[in-house]
Amino acid sequence: MPKTAKPNKKQEKSMEAALWESCNKLRGAVEPAEYKHVVLSLIFLKYAGDRFEQRKQDLVEQGLKEYIDTVEFYTAENVFYLPEGCRWSYIMQNAKQPNIFQIIDDALSNIEKKNKQLAGALPNNYYSNLGLDKTKFASLLDEINKLDTVKDSENDLIGRVYEYFLGKFAIAEGKGKGEYYTPKSVVNLIAEMIEPYDGKIYDPCCGSGGMFVQSMKFVKAHHGNQKNVSVYGQENTNTTFKLARMNLAIRGISADIRQGDTFHNDQHKDLKADYIMANPPFNQKGWRDDNQLIDDPRWRGFDIPPTSNANYGWILNILSKLSTNGMAGFLLANGALSADGTELAIRRKLIENDKVEAIIILPRNMFYSTDISVTLWILNNNKKARVVTKNGVEIHFRDRENEILFMDLRQMGVPFEKKYVELDQATRDIVIRTYHNWQQVTSVETGRAPSLQDYHDEPEFCYSATRDEIEQKGWSLVPSKYIEFRNRDEQIDFDTKMQELQADIRELLQQEEESKKELKMLFEKLGYKIC
């Protein structure tokens, strides 16, 4: 890594911290959970304004001054045309005016009207109704004014601020109260494994659109053509849906993002995607009533996912959207690897139908909002030997029918911000190389990088299991049941641990009920009735 990288990273962090500090001064009128929405629309205005001024200057320098107010000369370069009252320079000139909130609301409204791709993406009369302190708000505008969004355009300002603010809120309010978002290192790992060079990409719970942003960066980094990629997504929460639309519009990513509950109002019923990347809500309860979605075509050929947990509903939704050769990478809580009952029946059929390609356990403490370890699932609709051309290169896939690759990354990754873990590039390279060695043929004729080698099982890290082995283990997908452990005190048996924990909880609950009965009897003997 170049020596100049460290100062830049420190500068980025100080920018995010400064924005948080400015927002924190607004506390009272606005709670921390809302900070990101206050800041991100302003960053959008700054970004759009900077890009507009840059394009305007280019036209002047090219001798096209007479066209500086011609919309087409901006949209042709993927720049939003901004009327004068919508420009960041105008907003800053009026930052201390009593009507600044209305000026910003009008700017957002007019930009949306002038740019069809932003229809429904920007907040409507948002700032005028917040009741913010004008002096403190002016300080926030001053902080945002310091951002050089043109110079920093490739670093995904909106994504970075969104993640930072979510994390700060989660830490401040306690685990489980913040929203979930996917760490960039995990998104990069998914993209580097399934390689979405071209075709249709889908995310059924797309959040702020981070999966799409990182996917496009992957395509660009590998000299692919972004025009060959089509983006589809769905998000249920209205404010997050708007944020995704705004985030992708800033990046120039054309996308079909729709709002609605993916289970009850599927907006992409006929979609067949080549790549799916997703981070669904973990262990979502009450996602459907007992009499809902009974005959849904997404579960056709499988048992109906239970109402108590949406994990397998997400899996079957994702599977139903895959094209003939489609691949999916998504995160789930570890419990989905060994759940019993209906989930076991679905998991068994997934394995028998040869849809599961790889199961990767990630380290703990990767998320701000929860410290649990989670699983990366890779589904593949075609595990047969075949030749596929990606980005102009022939890739020769091995015949991996009736096999699943298991990987355990819990001892990998690097610490950051003292108590969290991320998968740095060196770690990801090891995982990706192992996966591609297992998945692809090593041959000079393939045109692949010379780093490809024959795959070998490795204790503590990876194991390629056959369907027969998995059947013998009761159709469990817990990696520790297959990977050989030599250097740890014990082999982790998730099923056994969970059964022991369940037994302990049952015993505690029984003891609690007995204690309640004894306490009730005691009060009744004293002449007091407890309802």
Image: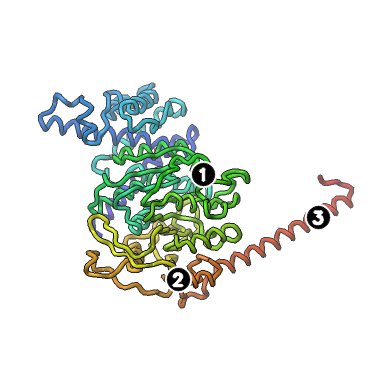
Side (left or right) of 64 relative to 331? left
Task: Using the rendered image of the protein, determine whether residue 234 is visible from the camera's viewpoint.
Answer: yes
Q: Quadrant of residue 458?
A: bottom left
Q: Position of residue 119 (x, y in %)?
A: 37, 30
Residue that label 1 marks = 263
Question: Which image quarter holds the C terminus?
Answer: top right
Quarter of the picture holding the N terminus: bottom left
Which label lies toward us, 1 or 3? Answer: 1
Up/down of 361 relative to 257, above or below: below
Q: Residue furthest left?
A: 63
Tell me the number on the disc at residue 517. Answer: 3
Q: Residue at x 31, y 41 (%)?
A: 253
Quickly name the residue at label 2: 465
Left or right: where does residue 371 sit relative to residue 274? right
Q: Position of residue 21 (x, y in %)?
A: 40, 41
Residue 430 picture quarter: bottom left
Q: Secondary structure at mark 3?
A: helix
Q: Amino acid at mark 3?
A: Lys
SS of the residue at dot 1? loop
Q: For the point 47% across and 45% down, which residue is it?
A: 169
* Type of the residue with mark 1: Phe
44 vs 430: above or below: above
